Amino acid sequence: MAVLRPRRKLRQRDATPFRRLLLRWHQQAIEAAASAPPEPAIENQTAMDQDEDEDEANLFRAEVADARPVRDSGHVIPERPKPAPVPIHSMRDEDAALEEALAGPDFLSDAIEIGDAENYLAHGLPGKVLRDLVQGRWAVQDALDLHGLRLEEARAAVVVFLARSRKRGLRCVLIIHGKGYGSSTGEPVLRDRTRGWLMQKDEVLAFCDAAAGQGGAGAVTVLLKAS
């Protein structure tokens, strides 16, 4: 920083008004410089910042000294699909319809005699409908397993399953009722009841024994009306 030094005192013969003005300005400049705060030591601060940066860098290098790069396994982690929205309103409508069906006076009688019927075709439909179902030309889109349910529970489960299948626009479904060998009487009670219930449902066009790989006589493949 430049330092202003007072000039030598002017002699009386040099003290013209102009020189006296210059002398006054010079004196004011000296006084202002003396009262001004000292300038920060920029060079010293810069050196301190560099030292701190170097210390942090050294600390980081010490922390990662034992780190090793992760090998690329080549596996791609697939992005998880977002869960489908839950159709709350549709489910409420279905539940209301099911409660009404379960409470109805004509709800799936157990008195229907089916004999040894393995196949069923609704009245007035051409035989080709049943033949296509028996030959497996319809792909099963969903299944219901009735194992472990009592008769009343199984009947309600069948009603719910059929209603929701039609709501979803399904045409071909599978109901697994078992062959009845484990029943107390040794007779296929649940099998016969299930097929009797299906014969009472207007939305059921046809049914037949399931394919061997899907349960055979222990399950029934059901063809539903288009919704």
Image (cartoon, rainbow, N blue to C red):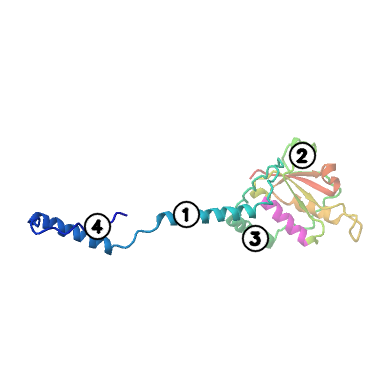
- Residue that label 2 marks: 133
Asked whether disc 2 touches disc 1, contact meaning CB atoms under 8 Å apart, the reply is no
- Residue that label 4 marks: 5
Among the two numbered marks 4 and 3 on one chain, the one whose residue lies closer to the N terminus: 4
Residue 113: where, in percent of width, then height? 82, 53
Mark 1: few/some/many CA within 10 Å (<14, 14-19, 20+): few
Which label was assigned to residue 47?
A: 1
Among the two numbered marks 2 and 1 on one chain, the one whose residue lies closer to the N terminus: 1
Among the two numbered marks 2 and 4 on one chain, the one whose residue lies closer to the N terminus: 4
What is the spatial separation of the Cα atoms under label 4 and label 3, in whole angstroms? 109 Å
Q: Secondary structure at mark 1?
A: helix
Residue at image coords 81%, 55%: 193
- Which one is in front in this view, the residue at disc 2 or the one at disc 3? 2
Residue 208: where, in percent of width, then height? 80, 44
Residue 78: where, in percent of width, then height? 66, 44
Among the two numbered marks 3 and 1 on one chain, the one whose residue lies closer to the N terminus: 1
